[in-house]
Image (cartoon, helix red, strand yellow):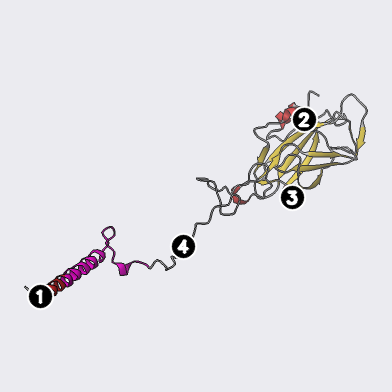
């Protein structure tokens, strides 16, 4: 074989091998072995990807935040001032009650032991809390509570319409006395020491003047008059 024929044959083989190589490369890139995606199906590397919107964190104390598994309470907590909304019993105020004072001493003796009776004259139930704030005449301080009469487990007495609660008062002890020609009672709110409503003027029990001194004390409200009086009648 002459030299020209050999060159022609080598050129033809090179052309065949080159075409086969290109065909193999195209076949190998036509489908990704790991994903099966075609190159045309993939996003170009320069195309921006829309980020997902991050979830909004729960901020403690925000209106929508709540403790895990907790059910928001609609009833006011202890110590909160309320009007009976959401099922809670309201606090008795001056417009809900009438209060009377009677002497528990023998007829003809000056009143020294007083029974206060609060009657619910309204149309809804309400609570009287702890003890009444009693102002005697021009005294600069209220009558202190008789602490032994307190029931820490039951700071309030619930009064349905027409029902009554009782508090007893002792006015004097062995010391000088001061005169009082008026008596005002103010009810407490849920918070200890607070007031609910306005003062209620209470008629004196059959006299125009009461006498009191620093020995005066008043019991907490109770559901019966007997237990209230037992705290003061021995004084």
Q: Residues within 10 Å of mark 2 (few under 14, many from 20)?
A: some
- Decide which of tag 1 and tag 3 comes sooner along the chain: 1
Task: Give the quarter of the figure containing the C terminus.
Answer: top right
Q: Which residue is mark 3?
A: 95
- Decide which of tag 3 and tag 2 comes sooner along the chain: 3
Pick the residue in front: 211 or 110.
211
Which SS class for mark 3? helix
Q: Is residue 111 left or right of residue 6?
A: right
Pick the residue in front: 147 or 65.
65
Check residue 146 in the rendering and tell me which mark sits there, or answer none: 2
- Decide which of tag 1 and tag 4 comes sooner along the chain: 1
- For the residues carrying marks 4 and 3, which lies nearer the camera in this image? 4
Residues drawn in magenta: 14-43
- Decide which of tag 1 and tag 2 comes sooner along the chain: 1
Which SS class for mark 1? helix
- For the residues carrying marks 3 and 2, which lies nearer the camera in this image? 2
Image quadrant where residue 111 sits: top right
Q: Residues within 10 Å of mark 4 (few under 14, many from 20)?
A: few
Q: Residues within 10 Å of mark 1 (few under 14, many from 20)?
A: few
Spatial CA span between label 3 and label 2: 26 Å
Which SS class for mark 2? loop
Q: Which residue is mark 4?
A: 51
Coordinates of residue 76 in the picture (x, y in percent)? 63, 46
């Amino acid at each position: 074989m002459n030299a020209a024929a050999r060159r022609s044959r080598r050129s033809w083989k090179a052309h065949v091998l080159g075409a086969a190589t290109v065909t193999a490369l195209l076949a190998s890139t036509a489908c990704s072995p790991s994903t099966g995606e075609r190159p045309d199906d993939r996003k170009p590397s320069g195309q921006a990807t829309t980020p997902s919107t991050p979830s909004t964190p729960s901020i403690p104390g925000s209106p929508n935040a709540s403790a895990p598994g907790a059910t928001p309470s609609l009833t006011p907590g202890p110590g909160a001032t309320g009007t009976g909304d959401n099922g809670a019993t309201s606090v008795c105020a001056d417009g809900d009650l009438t209060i009377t004072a009677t002497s528990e001493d023998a007829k003809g003796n000056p009143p020294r032991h007083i029974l206060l009776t609060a009657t619910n004259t309204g149309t809804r139930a309400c609570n009287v809390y702890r003890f009444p704030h009693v102002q005697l005449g021009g005294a600069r301080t209220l009558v202190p509570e008789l602490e032994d009469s307190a029931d820490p487990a039951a700071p309030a007495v619930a009064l349905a319409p027409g029902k009554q609660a009782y508090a007893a008062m002792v006015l004097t002890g062995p010391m000088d006395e001061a005169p009082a020609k008026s008596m005002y009672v103010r009810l407490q709110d849920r918070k200890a020491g607070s007031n609910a409503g306005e003062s209620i003027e209470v008629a004196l029990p059959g006299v125009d003047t009461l006498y009191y001194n620093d020995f005066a004390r008043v019991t907490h409200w109770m559901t019966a008059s007997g237990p209230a009086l037992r705290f003061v009648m021995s004084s």
